[in-house]
Image (cartoon, coloured by chain):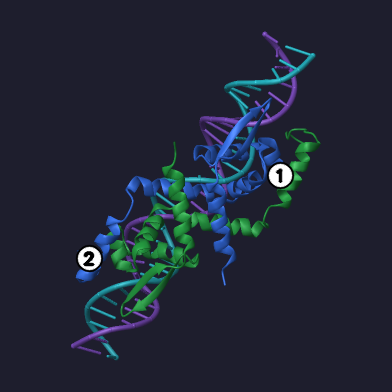
Chain colours: A blue, B green, C purple, D cyan
Amino acid sequence: MGDTCEVNEIHTDRIEHALKCMPPEDELYDLAELFKVFGDSTRIRILFVLFGEEMCVCDLAEALSMTQSAISHQLRILKQNKLVKSRREGKSIFYSLADDHVGTIIGQGMEHITEEA
Amino acid sequence: MGDTCEVNEIHTDRIEHALKCMPPEDELYDLAELFKVFGDSTRIRILFVLFGEEMCVCDLAEALSMTQSAISHQLRILKQNKLVKSRREGKSIFYSLADDHVGTIIGQGMEHITEEA
DNA sequence: CGTTCATATGAATAGTTATTCATATGTTCA
DNA sequence: TGAACATATGAATAACTATTCATATGAACG
């Protein structure tokens, strides 16, 4: 069919097996969406700061030398994906990491990039 | 100083502490780049297929119902980031996962998205 | 209450990226 | 060597996204 290679039985079996073990389409999509959130250096930096302690928006902005608006937009994305949670205290809103997966995922990523031989 | 909040000593300490514990700028950038690679459903699907067994480009294309060219472009990105490796056998080139981090990272991601209460 | 301050948000823009199409590379086999 | 095949790649386009600017929301406190 067109320009796909005309191969033998073995390959067909492989394809079928692979597809059988594959999660449903919407899970794969959600998974990619999740990693997309980690795939931005501003958000990574926010997560690293929050890794140490909770912090309010304007402090995050100052720590990362960025606009309050930019930080706020990114925090919204992080929150939608349940990577951070927020808590109000007076006029400020403090953000912190939502659970342990954040640390684990970032940790594995760090391992990967630092062990390049 | 513009519209940053004029806060007290405590916050300044937090900012300094956070910045002290932060990896250098280029590592953060590389880390975001790595996650960006996972942040595309086509590449995620490729990785899932390869999780089971090595496979050549045209089989991947057929398995995922995509163009050989599209798959090839994505494989290049995966290879540049050392997530897959390739092996030539005759006219075909077989791709497989490069190391265990791929599985661990994807596994943690799956845990995160499936445990949403 | 109304002002002030911290945060959120909508629209616009600039930069990035996945896919397609056409074509190049490089291997095999007659 | 040359034809056939698998894969790679360059340019172009369309879709997406991070930041900025302006402004809205909403709590605190006089």
For this view, does C15 lie left or right of residue B11? left
Is residue A57 positioned above or below B49 on the image?
A: above
| Rendered image: mark on residue A12 | 2
Distance, label 2 to label 1, CA atoms, is 54 Å
- Measured as percent of width and height from the top left, residue D3 is found at 22, 81
Chain letter of disc 1? A
* Of the image marks 2 and 1, the number of the one nearer the N terminus: 2
Q: Name the one closer to the observer, D3 or B115.
A: B115
Q: Quadrant of the rendered structure where residue D28 is?
A: top right
- Measured as percent of width and height from the top left, residue B100 is found at 47, 64
Residue that label 1 marks: A63
Chain letter of disc 2? A
Is residue A111 positioned above or below B13 on the image?
A: below
The residue at the point 37 percent across, 60 percent down is B46
Label 2, residues with CA under 10 Å away: few <14, some 14-19, many ≥20: some
Is residue B12 positioned above or below B70 on the image?
A: above
Amino acid type of disc 2?
A: Thr
- Measured as percent of width and height from the top left, residue D14 is found at 38, 48
Q: Quadrant of the rendered structure where residue D24 is?
A: top right
Q: Examine the rendering and report whether any part of residue A16 can be seen.
A: yes
Q: Nearer the viewer, mark 2 or mark 1?
A: 2
The residue at the point 53 percent across, 49 percent down is A38
**Image quarter in which the C terminus of chain A is found:** bottom right
Q: Name the one closer to the observer, A98 or C25.
A: A98
Amino acid type of disc 1?
A: Ala
